[in-house]
């Protein structure tokens, strides 16, 4: 898949096609089976990381059976569990595909896609803020899974104008923007282009996703590109001066006081919920019990009225409990090794895998997982370590010197994550 196909899929990541019950089928959702099948065919007998995949698939099933056997309050119906569990399994397989030796996605430079998204975001932001024109939102409303004129996105009722791009909310627009900007950063090592795109994205969307991922990318870049520390720090000071007023506005309180601010609901409330659930169920609760957990732990919190908390990091900890430390330690160790190896691209890949859905969205979203897989593949193309390089398709001949037998064997063997420092 080349740049055009990638651009269409990412631009239409959450574009609604039809609904099956309460589940919305999107363009990216329809592509996911194609992505999995083509990746499996491309790799055939060279699969790797079966053990991590088996752990992520089997653990939630075991936890559900334990809760059913014990008759706990979180033993949801089989139908609810399997509907959520099936999405989880597909999402995990999609992310697993991003780590396979061969990829169906080519090495992409998403500059044009970034420009298109930011132009659309600017039309929405400036059109509504200064001309009270909603045309930028109207053109994507028929394909959005959210109504921009009601609910929490209600663009006319909010004093804080925020662009949504081609997505369903500002946070997802911000996440996609910074994802594409990070892909460019890893490919070109141009921090100034990265800052320009992220500042523009943050200015029109006020998304914390950009702040979180951008703050992590900066020290990684400085760690590896030490000669550019002074100009980059100066650029960051200028960036802070430009975005600080918007940042203060986003940290502002809600209509009912400090408690109903976006920061409280997205960042603090999940910690409160986990503190109530994990002491009693340290190994986690079944996938699909999010609404039950929220209903039982937030009944006395008057400002929270949503049925569930859609925060991927929170959900991973809730569903895996203390077992979450296993993949967390594994990925953090790999991240640290990549930093020591000065492989910024793969360091970003592992951080993104851990934090991408922590700011917004859920691991049960296969569209979100597809974006993670695309990002992982892009970082592997930019990686400086042989152990992460993507192999050419069997029918292709790669230009340049052949890899050594030991490197080829390392790339094609399964098991634990390879050590980039080796």
Image (cartoon, rainbow, N blue to C red):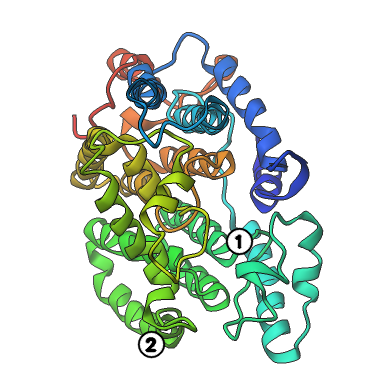
Asked which secondary structure carries label 1, the reply is: helix
Identify the mark at residue 114; answer none if there is no mark. 1
In the image, what residue occupies the spot 37% across and 80% down? 258
Q: Nearer the viewer, residue 273 or 197?
A: 273
Give the left or right position of residue 361, taking residue 234 as reference: right
Which quarter of the picture shows residue 214? Answer: bottom left
Read off the residue under disc 2.
241
Q: Quadrant of the C terminus?
A: top left
The mark total stands at 2
Q: Nearer the viewer, residue 355 or 226?
A: 355
Q: Quadrant of the N terminus?
A: top right
Give the left or right position of residue 45, taking residue 12 as reference: left
**Residue 376, x across and y down, in percent:** 44, 40
**Residue 2, x across and y down, in percent:** 66, 39
Residue 221 in view in this figure = yes
Asked which secondary structure carries label 2, the reply is: helix
Q: Nearer the viewer, residue 232 or 404?
A: 232
Identify the mark at residue 382; answer none if there is no mark. none
Answer above or below: position of 216 versus 107: below
List the single residue furthest toward the top.
45
In the image, what residue occupies the spot 75% across and 87% down? 132
**Residue 200, x across and y down, in percent:** 54, 75
Answer above or below: position of 6 versus 31: below
In the image, what residue occupies the spot 52% across and 69% down? 197
Residue 356 in view in this figure = no
Q: CA distance from mark 1 to mark 2?
A: 23 Å
Which quarter of the picture shows residue 320? Answer: top left
Give the left or right position of residue 202, taking residue 166 as reference: left
**Residue 268, x across and y down, in percent:** 32, 64
Give the left or right position of residue 210, taking residue 329 as reference: right
């Amino acid at each position: 898949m080349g740049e055009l196909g990638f651009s269409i899929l990412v631009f239409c990541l959450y574009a609604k096609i039809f609904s099956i019950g309460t589940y919305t089928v999107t363009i990216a959702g329809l592509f996911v089976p194609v992505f999995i099948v083509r990746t499996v065919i491309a790799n055939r007998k060279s699969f790797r990381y079966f053990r991590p995949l088996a752990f992520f698939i089997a653990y939630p099933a075991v936890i559900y059976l334990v809760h059913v056997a014990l008759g706990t309050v979180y033993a949801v119906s089989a139908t609810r569990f399997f509907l959520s569990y099936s999405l989880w399994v597909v999402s995990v397989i999609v992310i697993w595909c991003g780590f396979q030796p061969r990829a169906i996605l080519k090495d992409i430079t998403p500059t044009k896609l970034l420009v298109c998204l930011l132009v659309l975001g600017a039309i929405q932001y400036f059109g509504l803020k200064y001309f009270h024109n909603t045309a930028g939102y109207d053109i994507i409303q028929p394909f959005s899974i959210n109504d921009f004129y009601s609910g929490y996105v209600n663009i006319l009722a909010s004093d804080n104008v925020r662009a949504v791009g081609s997505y369903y909310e500002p946070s997802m627009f911000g996440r996609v923007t910074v994802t594409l900007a990070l892909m460019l950063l890893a490919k070109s090592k141009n921090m100034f282009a990265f800052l320009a795109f992220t500042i523009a994205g943050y200015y029109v969307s006020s998304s914390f996703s950009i702040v979180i991922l951008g703050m992590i990318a900066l020290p990684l870049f400085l760690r590896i590109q030490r000669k550019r520390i002074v100009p980059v720090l100066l650029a960051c000071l200028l960036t802070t001066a430009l975005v600080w007023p918007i940042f203060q506005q986003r940290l502002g309180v809600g209509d009912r006081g400090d408690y109903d601010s976006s920061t409280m609901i997205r960042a603090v409330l999940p910690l409160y919920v986990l503190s109530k659930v994990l002491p009693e169920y340290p190994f986690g609760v079944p996938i699909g019990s999010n609404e039950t957990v929220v209903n039982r732990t937030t009944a006395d919190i008057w400002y929270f009225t949503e049925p569930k908390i859609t925060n991927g990091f929170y959900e991973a900890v809730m569903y895996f409990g203390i077992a979450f430390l296993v993949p967390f330690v594994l990925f953090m160790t790999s991240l640290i090794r990549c930093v020591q190896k000065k492989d910024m691209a793969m360091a970003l890949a592992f951080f993104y895998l851990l934090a991408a859905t922590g700011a917004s969205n859920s691991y049960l979203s296969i569209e979100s997982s597809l974006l993670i897989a695309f990002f992982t593949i892009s970082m592997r193309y930019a990686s400086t370590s042989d152990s992460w390089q993507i192999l050419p398709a069997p029918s292709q001949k790669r230009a340049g010197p052949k890899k050594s037998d030991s490197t080829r064997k390392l790339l094609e063997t399964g098991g634990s994550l390879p050590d980039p420092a080796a």
